[in-house]
Image (tube, helix red, strand yellow):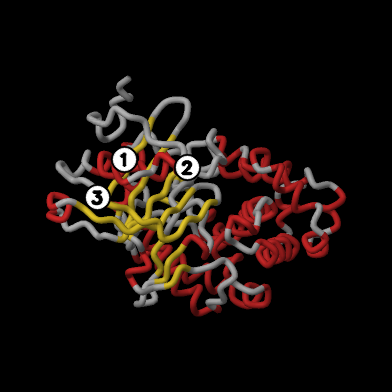
């Protein structure tokens, strides 16, 4: 049965695979041949496999002569939903669409994508074939890295360039598939979707030792506070831009030049920058660093955003109020983190819980 014509390669009639067993040299060659006619993959070696929300598979392949003529690298990284989790959300389809339609317009480096495709319908599925970034000679960052205030300032320069790429741009609305931050269930129902993992963390004595007592006494308070953040964002009137949506160090790659390459566009959105800005800053700074430098860093970010040509950027007082409230996004996200997914959540929870108390986030949101 033919697939809907809205995916980018209507000549592809077989659905994308849902299990790793279906990921064979023959399948990969047939799939990539939709973009590179005549290409065949003659062999494939799996170098590393990582399953979390989705699957990342680092592979080495050989091509036939037609494939070699395209100059494609032999080391690739496949990313799709082969983990058996989250089959009912559209994160892989969103990321594939993002690489296909949006990354060519960004003014920051992204991973080179050699193939992006998706299936439509009730089960939103997606596939991206990326360069193997290990070959760039940089470093995959981790949420627990310590860049210091200077390193965060440098990253915020790059983040401002990302946000400024399509600031208030008609391209955002022209891509009707691009969801608006906090107006899609994966965003506004995030606490409820992830509640089973929040409950798992609530059983952990180490987690309970750093969580505020008022939260432990009433864990559903985070749900009410997050709903207030959603309502606050929906009522706000300011230009939209492209946001990463899950903007922590673990979703970046530090190039040999020191510039950050932004990864993981599964929550890529049309949104306001405070979601990325707050999430990255609070998660990347120690508690003492945040207390000492947060206002200066917000001012630096604003100046860099204006330098991209962005118009009608809110003033520092407004950004400060946004920052104080958007801490709640980080609180609800990290309380649902499982360390087995690759990021150590305890330091992040401590940073966001402490920021929530310092900045009176709960009270500002009326909870």
Badge 1: residue crowd in 10 Å (few <14, some 14–19, many ≥20): some
The extreme front residue here reads: 43
Residue at 21% x, 57% y is 72
Which tag is nearer the camera, tag 1 or tag 2?
A: 1
Front-most of residues 134 and 48: 48
Q: Which of the marked residues, 1 or 2, is nearer the chain's N terminus? A: 1
State the SS at label 1.
Answer: helix
Q: Which of the marked residues, 2 or 3, is nearer the chain's N terminus? A: 3
Residue at 84% x, 54% y is 214
Residue 121 in view, yes or no: yes
Badge 3: residue crowd in 10 Å (few <14, some 14–19, many ≥20): some
CA separation, marks 1 and 2? Answer: 16 Å
Left or right: residue 279 compared with residue 116: right
Residue highlighted by disc 1: 27
CA separation, marks 2 and 3? Answer: 24 Å
What number is the disc on residue 81?
A: 2
Residue highlighted by disc 3: 42
Residue at 21% x, 41% y is 33
Front-most of residues 302 and 190: 190
Front-most of residues 294 and 202: 202
Which tag is nearer the camera, tag 1 or tag 3?
A: 3
Quadrant of res 162? bottom left
Badge 2: residue crowd in 10 Å (few <14, some 14–19, many ≥20): many
Where does the image place residue 332, in percent across and percent down from the top left?
Answer: 67, 50
Where does the image place residue 100, in percent across and percent down from the top left?
Answer: 30, 44
Residue at 41% x, 45% y is 95
Quadrant of res 253? bottom left
Whether 150 is drawn above or below 56: the answer is below
Whether 298 is drawn above or below 172: the answer is below
Front-most of residues 4 and 134: 134
């Amino acid at each position: 049965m033919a697939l809907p014509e809205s995916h980018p390669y209507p000549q592809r009639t077989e659905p994308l695979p849902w299990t790793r067993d279906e990921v064979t040299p023959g399948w990969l060659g047939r799939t990539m041949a939709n973009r590179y006619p005549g290409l065949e993959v003659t062999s494939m070696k799996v170098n590393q496999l990582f399953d979390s929300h989705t699957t990342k598979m680092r592979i080495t392949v050989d091509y036939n002569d037609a494939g070699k003529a395209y100059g494609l690298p032999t080391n690739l990284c496949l990313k799709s939903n082969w983990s058996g989790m989250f089959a009912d959300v559209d994160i892989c389809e969103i990321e594939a669409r993002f690489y296909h339609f949006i990354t060519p317009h960004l003014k920051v480096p992204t991973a080179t994508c050699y193939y992006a495709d998706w299936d439509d319908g009730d089960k939103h599925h997606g596939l991206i074939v990326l360069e193997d970034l290990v070959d760039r000679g940089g470093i995959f960052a981790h949420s627990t890295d310590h860049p210091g205030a200077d390193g965060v300032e440098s990253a915020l320069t790059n983040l401002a360039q990302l946000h400024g790429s399509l600031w208030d741009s008609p391209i955002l609305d022209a891509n009707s598939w691009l969801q608006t931050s906090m107006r899609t269930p994966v965003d506004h129902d995030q606490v409820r979707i992830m509640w089973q993992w929040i409950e798992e963390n609530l059983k952990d004595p180490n987690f309970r030792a750093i969580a505020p007592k008022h939260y432990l006494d009433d864990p559903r308070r985070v749900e009410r506070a997050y709903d207030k953040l959603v309502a606050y964002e929906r009522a706000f009137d300011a230009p939209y831009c492209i946001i990463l949506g899950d903007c922590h160090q673990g979703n970046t790659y530090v190039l040999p030049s020191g510039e950050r390459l932004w990864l993981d566009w599964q929550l890529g959105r049309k949104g306001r920058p405070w979601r990325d800005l707050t999430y990255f800053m609070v998660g990347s700074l120690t508690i003492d660093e945040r207390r000492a430098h947060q206002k200066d860093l917000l001012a630096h970010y604003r100046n860099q955003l204006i330098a991209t040509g962005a118009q009608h950027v809110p003033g520092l007082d407004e950004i400060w109020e946004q920052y104080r409230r958007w801490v709640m996004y980080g609180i609800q996200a990290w309380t649902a983190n499982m360390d087995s997914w690759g990021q150590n959540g305890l330091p992040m929870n401590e940073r966001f819980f402490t920021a929530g108390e310092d900045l009176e986030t709960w009270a500002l949101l009326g909870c």
